[in-house]
Amino acid sequence: MTEKRQDTQSIMALLKSHGARFYLFVGVLAAIVGWGLYAFYVEYVYGLGVTGDRLPVVWGLNVVNFVYFIAISMAGTIISGILRLSNADWRKPITRMAEAITVAALPIGALFPLLDLGRPERVLNLFLLARLQSPIAWDGIAIGTYIIASLIYFYLPLIPDLAACRDSLQAVSKLRRWLYTKLSLGWSGLAEQDKRLKGAIKIMAILVVPIAVSVHSVLSWVFSVTLRVEWHSTVFPIFFVMGAVYSGVATILIVMYAFRRFYHLELYLEVKHFLYLAYVFLAADLAMIYLTVSEYMTPSWGAETLDLQYLASITTGPYAAYFWFMIIGGFIIPAIVVSVPRARTIGLIVVAAVLANLGMWIERFLIIIPSLAVPQLSTPPGITYLPGLYTPSWVELSITFAGLAGFALLLVVLSRLVPIISLWEISEPEVSSAGPAMASAPVMSQAQETEGPKSP
Amino acid sequence: MCSLDQNRRQFLLGAGAAAAGLALTAVSSGLVPPASTQTQDTDSLQDASKNYVFVIDLNACDGCAKCTEACQAEMAVPPTSGGELEFEGKQPWIQVFKTDSGFIPVPCQNCQNAPCTKVCPVGATFYSDDHIVLIDQNRCIGCRYCIVACPYERRFFNWFDPPSTLDEQNTVYSPDYNVPHRKGVAEKCIWCRHRVAEGTVPACVDACRQAGMSALWFGDAAQGVVTNGQDVVSLSDLIKDRGAYKLNEELGTLPQVLYLPPKGESP
């Protein structure tokens, strides 16, 4: 602990000088985002026809990405909110990152449906003429609330660290110094301040959990309240919430790995952090397998015409490759990797997390596109109706990659503006962390052994 | 302590300013008029007790699709954008499908519990006073949720700017006669409300009679009569002993199109 306390300087150093590699990375990301903006400009000028969306598959990658990015924002809530509430002290070095993921993923996710409007210039109608009976309006309210709540929840634990920046970062630009000074709200570490801050953080930690659950549920209702095949299902809200937990935890594993590697944070992000998160990841994975079985078994047993058409299209039809990749690569392999102690190395855990994220992206794709492609008119008998086709165009693909780049860009910029590890929290003495640390000590040491040669 | 309180005051001031900003937006939103509303003059002619219905006699339909052609001419229907297998050429607002026992023309079912109007986030699709589902394309934002929600796949979308003639461009737009068409908005069959408001039948009904089939009948169930544009018959006589049904009625959408199955007795 003392070692860590002394070493906060190395985190602070990240905020001082950025180096050529940082600017190169930011430049590349910004270029990808710029290309995505150009793609959107083309879409704006010529119309949504430049995307691959066509009747009856009128929602494509933009909606897939919307669901995907909103889902990974769950990272902050799960890691930070729930672990904070359960007093799991090992969370301390990860909370800031997790909250940053939420703060970065939400605006990117919320942007996608707005980029997907046929008349983007009328976007204000969504607010000025909002019709509260529409699930899209529920979505707007839920996501808006979530963005505000997660910004507050990101900001509150940041205050003491902002004060530290104010006090110790003399060489940075005037604007940043001004920001640190203003945003740290005169924090001086008084006992009274500490008490109030912790109280406020606790309130927000309690609040963000139900808000996150509501966001992912409402997101699922956009689909499940319609009469579409596959969507019209009561399992959808919990399916979406659990999917968000799964992809959220997978995302934080990846982000943790990247920061650990490039910022050399091995001192803070230890093997145990990857291990503990991997347990959460495994639990979410198993829950997803359970829900996926439930989601597909129920309609296949009832065997309604349209349900069977949908199931055939994803299991043996044009989407079969995606479906089986999702099942095997996205769910089963990650579960095996994290279940087998010998395989539980940082490298393999991160590989499992990447697979899980790919699988979850494909899952959103499989929920949206094949379902829209199934012809809805099934009577009278023998009605001839061709199923829909969908091939994403360069425009949607560009916007997709721009979304990913934008997400990474926001994270990287945040990590250079504020300490990416909550310095004041890790400097506090641990109170009640004996529980989890002791319970899994043997596994930990084994993983450390296997992990040894791989760590950079 | 003093500094804390001061900061709290500043914080509250800031929060108050933000709240005031939000309130201002809300107030101004009340001042913004809807992009366009229904034309009042036709509305006043409408009777809220109307209950328009289509009766489609599948025994009489020979699948010639003259109804689709007439519709496309009457409403200056925009072309599709390629890649839509089911819809080559122009959007088939009334579409004739092949079935095991013949053909079935499917116009908008004009559901009285319409999934499309339920999901619209901006109220751009709505019921006219005489219960016809219309779209205000000056208000539509193009989210396509209505298209996703329609279980009859009777909604279309202008993916690009549709071509329009000078005449069409000079037409005064109203949701009753949604010409000129524009890009990025939903489209649908509106039961030729501009014609119905003047007491005539939709263009497809006329075309079907002129082609000699008279498979399409249109009328007001409240008055108990339907017409093929020429003959006026009693609705109950027309559907008597024919086992009339509605498409996917079990969905609870309350569709207003009655289908007479092909193998029944002729009326």
Image: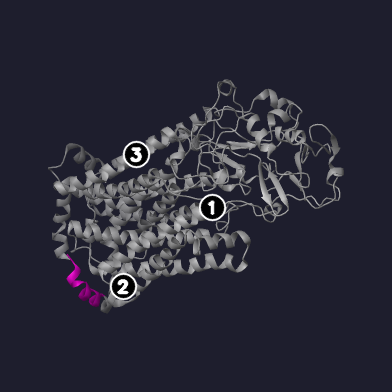
Main SS, magenta region, reads helix
Label 2: which secondary element = helix
- Subunit that carries the residue with mark 3: A
Residue B152: horizontal and vertical position, in percent? 63, 47
User: Would you say B79 lies left or right of A257 here?
Assistant: right
Specify whether disc 1 shares its chain with disc 3: yes
What mark, if any, has residue A37 been given in the picture? 3
- Which subunit holds the residue at mark 2? A
Please name the amino acid that badge 3 sits on: Leu
Element type at mark 3:
helix
Q: CA distance from mark 1 to mark 3?
A: 28 Å
Q: Which residue is mark 1?
A: A373
Packing grade of label 1 (10 A; few <14, some 14-19, many >=20) is: many
Q: Residue at x 68, y 40 (%)?
A: B65
Q: Which residues are magenta?
A: A444-456
State the image coordinates of residue A395 (x, y, percent, origin top left).
39, 43
